[in-house]
Each structure stands twice: as structure tokens, then as C-alpha cells.
Image (cartoon, rainbow, N blue to C red):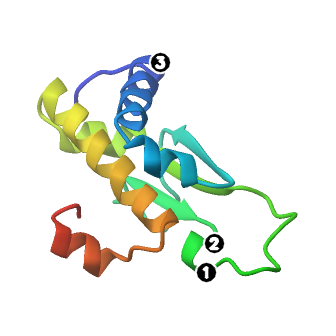
Amino acid sequence: MLELSEEQFEALVADALDGIPPELAQVMDNVVILVEDEPPDDAPELLGLYEGTPLTERGGDYGGVLPDTIRLFRLPILRICETYDDVVDEVLITVVHEIAHHFGIDDDRLHELGWA
């Protein structure tokens, strides 16, 4: 398994977020992005997880709620990657994938678009 510190991994996540088109970043609403070492025990294969209410499902009564959460799981990503460049690519793919869920795009559509 590749070795990458939490700080180095978080820098890759920040770089991936900086690559999100500004017009999309501006409409992301009430979402926080976290890096954790491992996914939940019941889903050890997960690289990322979106938890919340997608923008497409928020109605007029949406408000006063905790932020949506996007979690990126550092160690599973490192386990599937062979090189540093693989990690850079996988972090970007995972960030885009989870942000897409925030925008209401499901896994089937992400597969069609080549982001799954």
C-alpha cells in the first residue's frame, strides 16, 4: 500500500475541489467535505460517501438542518492505487462522484458519464 500522510491526502482533496468549475462550486450549498481513514464497517469497499439531501430534493421547507456530508476514505483509496498519480486520479474521481450525488445525480447516470 502506498504511504501518504493525512496532510498530503487532504492536499490532494483540496486540489480536486479547486478543479471543480466555479459555476458548480458556487451552487454547492450546505455541504462539508471530510477525510476519514476508513469507511463504515458495513461497507469496507467504499472510497467515498455522500450523506444528506441532494439539491434536487430540497423544497421550500429545507432549512435549519445540519450540512450534508461528503466523506472520502483515505486508506481504501490508497489500497487500490499503485502509484501517486493513481491516487491523484482516484481522489478526483471520488470527489466528482460524491459532489454529483449532492447535485442529485445517481450512480447509474454517473456510470453513463464515465465517473463511476
| Percent coordinates x, y for residue 66 in the rendering | 79, 58
- For residue 41, say whether it is visible: no
Q: CA distance from mark 2 to mark 1?
A: 6 Å
Say which of 2 and 98 sits in front: 98
Out of 75 and 56, give the one closest to the viewer: 56
Confirm or deny contact between disc 2 and disc 1 (CB under 8 A). yes
For disc 1, the marked residue is 57
Provide the secondary structure element on which disc 1 rests. Answer: helix
Residue 29: tell me if it is visible.
Answer: yes
- Splitting the image into 4 quarters, where does residue 116 fall? bottom left
Q: Position of residue 5 (x, y in %)?
A: 41, 19
Under tag 3, what secondary structure?
A: helix
For label 3, the residue is: 7
Residue drawn at point x = 82 percent, y = 64 percent = 65
Task: Please tell me how crowded label 2 is: few (under 14), some (14-19), or many (20+) other residues with Cα within 10 Å.
Answer: some
Residue type (three-letter) at the residue carrying disc 3: Glu
Q: Give the label on residue 43, or none.
A: none
Identified by mark 2, the residue type is: Thr
Q: Which residue is mark 2?
A: 53
State the separation of the CA atoms marked 3 and 1: 34 Å
Please indicate whether residue 33 sits to the left or right of residue 103 in the image.
right
Instruction: Name the image quarter holding the N terminus.
Output: top left
Q: Three-letter amino acid code at disc 1?
A: Glu
Residue sitting at 48 percent across and 59 percent down?
A: 49
Q: Are marks 3 and 2 in contact (CB under 8 Å)?
A: no
Residue density around tag 3, few if under 14, some if 14–19, many if 20 or more, within 10 Å: few
Determine whether, in the image, residue 27 is placed left or right of residue 76: right
